[in-house]
Amino acid sequence: MSPTLRLLSALLLPCSVHLARAATADGFVPPSRSPLVQTSNYTSFSNNTLNDKRVVKGKVFNRIIQVWLENTDFETATSTPTFESLMEQGILFTNYNSVTHPSEPNCQFFPPPDLSPVEDNIWSDVAAIGGDFFGMADDNMYHIPSNISTVVDLLEDKDVSWATYQENMATDGSYAFFFAAPNYASPESPPYPYYMRKHNGLVVFDAISQDSSRAKRIRTFNDFANDVVNGTLPQWIFVTPNMVNDAHDTTIDFAASFLEYWLLPLLTDPRVNGEDTLILLTFDENHTSTEQNRIFALALGTAVPLNLRGTTDDTLYTHYSSISTVEANWNLKSLGRQDTNPIVSNVFSFVAEKTGYKNVHVPASQVPQFNLTAVTPGALTSALFVPFAAPNLKARGAGSGGVLTRPGLDEKLTPEKLPPAGEHDRAEQDHAVADEPRDDEREEYHPLCGCAVCVSKRVRICSRAVLHAQHSKSDKMLSFLTELYRKNCIIRVSPEIYIFG
Ligand SMILES: *[C@@H]1O[C@H](CO)[C@@H](O)[C@H](O)[C@H]1NC(C)=O
Ligand SMILES: *[C@@H]1O[C@H](CO)[C@@H](O)[C@H](O)[C@H]1NC(C)=O
Ligand SMILES: *[C@@H]1O[C@H](CO)[C@@H](O)[C@H](O)[C@H]1NC(C)=O
Ligand SMILES: *[C@@H]1O[C@H](CO)[C@@H](O)[C@H](O)[C@H]1NC(C)=O
Ligand SMILES: *[C@@H]1O[C@H](CO)[C@@H](O)[C@H](O)[C@H]1NC(C)=O
Ligand SMILES: *[C@@H]1O[C@H](CO)[C@@H](O)[C@H](O)[C@H]1NC(C)=O
C-alpha cells in the first residue's frame, strides 16, 4: 500500500451520515412547507413565469411528468410501502429497462472496505432526451453539438410546451457541474452537493443549453411552485429530485419519504394531475450491474384508465420508450435513433392501443443486454470513438412525419460512412469529449468558494468548494476525490468533508 493510499484509507473511514433534525426515521426532512411553496432552502427564488397556457391535445394524455429516482433494483422499490401503495393507483411496468450500465467504479486506488459499489451515470438521462447515449461510459462534463436533435425539437415542432425542474439547481439554465447549497437538513454542516449536472440530461445538449429561450426552461423547484400556482405548468416535464431525495446518496426509504412529501399531494392537485395527465415514476438504472438492468417504472395519473389501475404490464420497455410514447401521443416526428428501433422502443401499451401503434413482442432470446458498458462506439467515448453521425433519415417513428433534423447536420454522414471505432484522429476525439471551462460556471458556486479554480483533466471545482462523501453510496465521488488528491488539489480532508483549493 502506498503512503497516499494508506493516508486516504485512514481519512476516508469510517463514513457515516449525519443528518441532524431528522423529520422521519430515515432522515428525510422537507425542504419547504409544501412542494407549491417557494423556499430559501432552494437558493434562488423564481424570477419569471412560463407562458404555457395553451394545451396541445394529445391522443391519450395532455401532460406527461417524468420523475426519475436513482440506482435502485426493481424488487427493492416494489417492496417499499410507499411504492407498493402507489402501485395500486397505476400500471406497474414489470419489464422496463435502463439502456446500459456504467463501468466498474474506479476503486483501484483505495478499495474502501465498508463501501458497496455503486454505479451512476448520465447516459440514461441523455438517452431519454436524445434517443442515444453516444457511447458514453463515464460521467464527465460532456456536451453534445447543436446539430443533434432531441425530444425538445420534436415537442416544439408541434407547439407542445416543456420544461425540466431540477431540485437545488442554483439558477435557471445552470451549466455547472454540481452545486453545493446550504445543508437544510443540518444547517451547522457545510454545504451539501445537492445538485449534479449528471442528472440533468437536457443541459448536456448544446441545442438546449446554448439557446437562451430554451435554457430558461431548465428550471428550479421554486420555479415549479411558481409555474403550478400561476397555472403555466408545461405539457412535457422532467423532474429530478436532489441527490438525497432521489435515493442516490441515501436509501429507498428516504426517497419514499420524499415522495410522500412531494408527489402524493400533487396527485390530488388538479393544477398538476389535471385532466389526462400521465406521471411516469421511474429510476435511471438498477443497482446490480452483473444482472440485466430492469428498473421500477410506474404509470400514474389521470390518464391511466381506471380499469388498468393496480395492474402490471410485462411489455419490454426501455428509457427510449418514454420518447416513442410521447411521439405516438402527439403524433410527433422522430429522432431516427434508438427511439425508432422497434426492439427497444415499444410504446406504453395503453397508449399504443389508443394510437394504433403496433408494439413488437421481443422473444427472451432477442432481448438486448442492457447491462453492458463501454462496448458501444460513439462520439462520447475515447476508447471506441466515432464522430457524431446522422440519424437514420428513413426511420419510421411512433408518430408520423419523418425524422426531424437540426441545422448543421451532415445528413450524408450516416453510421455506415464512418471509419470503424478507434481509427480516428486523437485530437478530434479529445475535442469531442472534453468540455472547455466556462467563466460563468465560477459564479454559480456557493459564496464559500474563493475565486481560484482547481482543474483536473475535465472537471473544474471552485476553490474551497466543500463536498461531503459522508454516505456509503458515494464511492464514485470518492474515486474522483482520490484523483484530485493525486494532483495535489485537495488541501484538507476530514473523514466526511473534502475541501479543494
Ligand atoms: C428549510 O428546511 C428545513 C428542514 O426541513 C426547515 O426546518 C425549514 O423550515 C426550511 N426553510 C424554509 C424557508 O422553508
Ligand atoms: C433570479 O434572478 C437573480 C438575478 O439575476 C438570480 O440571482 C437568481 O438566481 C434568479 N433565479 C433563478 C431561479 O434563476
Ligand atoms: C406568477 O409568477 C410571477 C413571477 O414569478 C409572480 O410574481 C406572480 O405572483 C405569479 N402569479 C400568481 C398568480 O401566483
Ligand atoms: C448481464 O446480465 C446477464 C443476464 O442476467 C448476465 O448473464 C451477464 O453476466 C451480465 N453481464 C455483465 C457484464 O454483468
Ligand atoms: C436488475 O434487473 C434484473 C431484471 O432485468 C433483475 O433480474 C435483477 O434482479 C435486478 N437486480 C437486482 C439485484 O435485483
Ligand atoms: C455534428 O456537429 C459536430 C460538431 O460540429 C461535428 O463534429 C459532426 O461531424 C456533426 N455531425 C453530423 C452528422 O453532421
Image (tube, grey):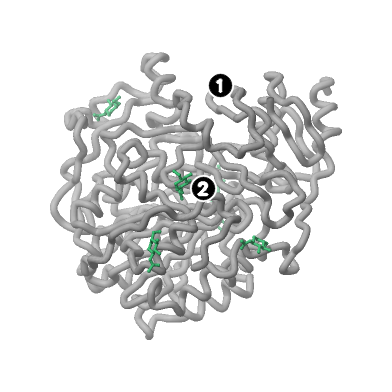
The answer to whether one can see residue 181 in this image is yes
**Closer-to-camera residue (326/160):** 160
Query: Can you tell which mark lies on residue 457?
Result: 1
Query: Can you tell which mark lies on residue 121?
Result: none
Quick check: 266 above or below 122? below
Q: Quadrant of residue 26?
A: bottom right
Tell me what residue is drawn at x 47 percent, y 26 percent: 439
Label 2 to label 1: alpha-carbon separation: 24 Å
Tell me what residue is drawn at x 45 percent, y 55 percent: 46
> Disc 2 designates what residue?
169
Q: Residues within 10 Å of mark 2 (few under 14, many from 20)?
A: many
Question: In the rendered structure, which amino acid carries the disc numbered 2?
Answer: Met
Q: Position of residue 53 (x, y in %)?
A: 26, 66
Tell me what residue is drawn at x 32 percent, y 77 percent: 275
Q: Residues within 10 Å of mark 1 (few under 14, many from 20)?
A: few
- Specify whether tag 2 is near ligand 2 (CB below 8 Å): no
Q: First in sequence: mark 2 or mark 1? A: 2
Q: Quadrant of residue 389?
A: top left
User: Cβ–Cβ below 8 Å for labels 2 and 1?
Assistant: no
**Closer-to-camera residue (212/424):** 212
Quick check: 56 above or below 102? below
The quadrant of the image that shows the C terminus is top right
- Left or right of 388, for residue 258: right
Name the outermost residue toward the bottom.
Answer: 307
Q: Position of residue 158 (x, y in %)?
A: 18, 56
SS of the residue at dot 2? Answer: loop
Q: Position of residue 8 (x, y in %)?
A: 80, 30
- Left or right of 422, for residue 63: left
